[in-house]
Image: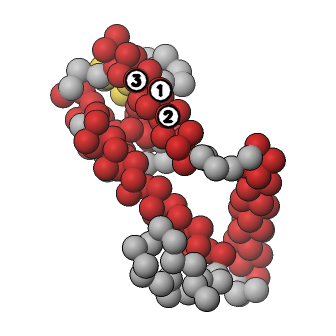
Amino acid sequence: MADTEGTDQIPLLFDHGVSFRITGVANRLNRSAAVFYREIFGIGLPEWRMMLALGKTPELKVGDAARSADLDAAQASRALKLLKARELVTMEMTASRGRATIVRLTEGGRAFHDRLLEAGDRRAERIRAGFTPEELAQLFDLLGRIGANAEALIELQRETGQDP
């Protein structure tokens, strides 16, 4: 029997596939985060990811910020344009670094980043609600192993050019 809890009683089409289940959960988490950050902070997930990436270091080249935020160049450019318009970041062209554009959080951007982190921590607590520390450790271990298996599958496919 398919698990329908939390899906408005719509049965899952394929409830035994690991990839399908993980992707479904990831999609729900992303939709939830998108609504939350849009409604509370007026930003989308690309801007949120960029703010988190920029909060880890005093300055980044645009390309490095995009990679750190796991965004493609177009997404990063749009996110930075919005963040700059809101005066959360500054962007400076520099000849000394191969004509790179350097991005930095403004003072207001740093405060905004800190608010994002606090809100993210509260969201994470709600997402983890009902799990024991042992269950969370097991979940993270299992997800790590699934991730490692997926990476090994990618390598196998590259080496052989075939499906497993």
- Amino acid type assigned to the residue bearing label 2 in the image: Arg
Give percent across and percent down for residue 163: 70, 87
Q: Secondary structure at mark 1?
A: helix
- The residue to which callout 1 is attached is 118
Q: Report if the CB atoms under discs 1 and 3 are less than 8 Å apart.
A: yes
Observer-side mark, 2 or 1, equals 2
- Amino acid type assigned to the residue bearing label 1 in the image: Glu
For image coordinates 60% across by 46% down, the residue present is 129
Location of the N terminus by quadrant is bottom right
Closer-to-camera residue (160/79): 79
Q: Is residue 34 above or below residue 102?
A: below
Residue 124 vs residue 157: left or right?
left
Q: Report if the CB atoms under discs 2 and 1 are less than 8 Å apart.
A: yes
Observer-side mark, 2 or 3, equals 2
- The residue to which callout 3 is attached is 115
For image coordinates 51% across by 61% down, the residue present is 26
Inspect this view and state whether residue 91 appears: yes
Q: Residues within 10 Å of mark 2 (few under 14, many from 20)?
A: few
Q: Is residue 123 above or below residue 13?
A: above
Q: Secondary structure at mark 2?
A: helix
Q: Residue furthest top?
A: 107
- Amino acid type assigned to the residue bearing label 3 in the image: Arg
Q: Report if the CB atoms under discs 2 and 3 are less than 8 Å apart.
A: no
- The residue to which callout 2 is attached is 122
Closer-to-camera residue (156/32): 32
Question: Spatial distance from mark 2 to mark 3, Cα to Cα?
Answer: 11 Å
Give percent across and percent down for residue 108: 31, 14
Q: Is residue 52 above or below residue 9?
A: above
